[in-house]
Amino acid sequence: MEFDEPSYDELKEQVAALELVLEQRDTENTELRDRIHVLETRLADLEERLGRTPRNSSMPPSKEGLSKPPAANRAERRAQKRRQGKQPGQEGRHLAQVTEPDEVVVHAPVTCPECGRNLFGADVIDEEVRQVFEVEVKRRVTEHRVQVRRCRCGCEVKAQAPREATAPASYGPGVRALACYLAVFQHLPYDRMGQLFRDVLGLEVSTGALAKMVAEGGGALGLFLDVVRDLLQDAPAVHFDETGGRVEGRLHWVHVACSALYTLLECHQKRGTVAMDDMGVIAKMTGIAIHDGWKPYRSYDVVHALCNAHHLRELEGIGVVWDQGWANELADLLIEARDAVDDAKAQGKDRLDSPALHSIRVRYGMLVKKGWAANPAPEVGKRSGYNKKAANLLVRLDTQRQDVLRFATDFDVSFTNNQGERDIRMVKLQQKISGSWRSLDGARNYCAIRSYISTMKKHGVEVLGGLRQLFDGQAWLPGAT
């Protein structure tokens, strides 16, 4: 059987058809590759989200739930050659005897077990001292009889009643101080506080009376808050942070400005500069503002320092989840710089040696450059392995490198913003227990009393004593230190 050879025109048509098929397949392959890239990027993003923990991201510890890993177990302690309890070289703690006990009870033997003779008046040759610590919790009622006397001239004069005796029956400053302490520092709900007063102290106190005591305490702290605000304005370094809280069912914000000696908490409807201006610290301060890099803080013309705890978490996420080695190296450099600063402080120095600081800066710049090389900006119209999370972090580390390394150039600046986070953390616990505040005044009273207690604890002042002073009309005030 013979076949006619195709003509030139027929061959040309077949080649054109095949080229069209190839072009269509190339287009389909390009679309599939783009689709695969999108899915791979999405999968990597989902895996990164699933792998987020408070240790490699800014996720709060409260969201970790029951997936939080357990503390070091016995095998880990054994591998580290650590035993339970106090570690060698650390100062131990125990219940120690006091030099002046409240009561002394002498126990003397009565008769001799050998001869049966009475030992009254016998010589004391040795004595063993044992002390028992006990708590006496009871109600005490003081009756004040305010007399009215008539002078010979006929004038009747009434004595002045004590400040706390405002009615025929009233609660004293100690009860009010304890109510504020339990409500604000121990986060006890008012109903359970009433039960504690009734069951432990034998004192009936309504929830309304307890709420009124807290409101009274918060309202009496105006002078204290003004003094702390002025002291923070003059402090060499101040930590700032904010967290959400619900007031009357709506989202509000609790702001903190604090240092190692002072705490100022305020609740506001806004989160940004309006609230910060009303707080009156960062807009008027002369020192360094330490914060987590939130953009509104940059609105103020002050020297800034960034929290490196945030950077370490983000670098760990990028280094481990996204497998970018520069992030691990930069995290190690930051920790090395922190240790160098700690060693310099321990030696009584107020700055790092110039060669050490220069080395930190040079290595820092090289690692940031290495990070940019691993995350190049995508070309227009083309897809690449662009990691937006890494790029956003690199922008901050690159453009604000002086603020990142501020702790290494100024020893008044701490490595992290943990002071601010610690002082505001209990607001979240309050929200967990109570859910929300019923009024903005209630939230602000809580913040005022919390500021008062936190500042007293930083100064080593006995908390209940300071709260009692508050209700005696003489609130404790910190001095400039």
Image (tube, rainbow, N blue to C red):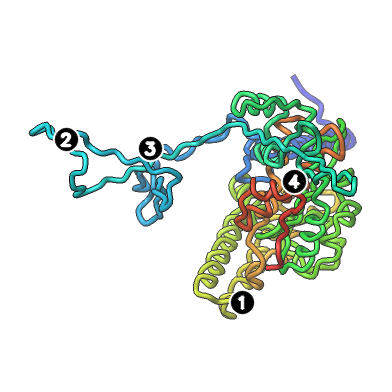
For mark 3, give the secondary structure. Answer: helix
Q: Which residue is mark 3?
A: 74
Residue found at x 59% / y 80%: 354
Amino acid type assigned to the residue bearing label 1 in the image:
His
Quarter residue 42 falls in: top right
> Dot 4 surroundings within 10 Å: few (below 14), some, or many (20 or more)?
many
Amino acid type assigned to the residue bearing label 2 in the image:
Asn
Q: Which residue is mark 4?
A: 471
Q: Any mark on residue 358, and which?
A: 1
Q: In the rendered structure, which disc, 3 or 2, sits on the residue that comes first in sequence?
A: 3
For mark 4, give the secondary structure. Answer: helix
Q: In the rendered structure, which disc, 2 or 1, sits on the residue that comes first in sequence?
A: 2
CB contact under 8 Å: marks 2 and 4: no
Q: In the rendered structure, which disc, 4 or 3, sits on the residue that comes first in sequence?
A: 3
Nearest-to-viewer mark from 2 and 4: 2
Residue found at x 62% / y 40%: 53
> Dot 2 surroundings within 10 Å: few (below 14), some, or many (20 or more)?
few
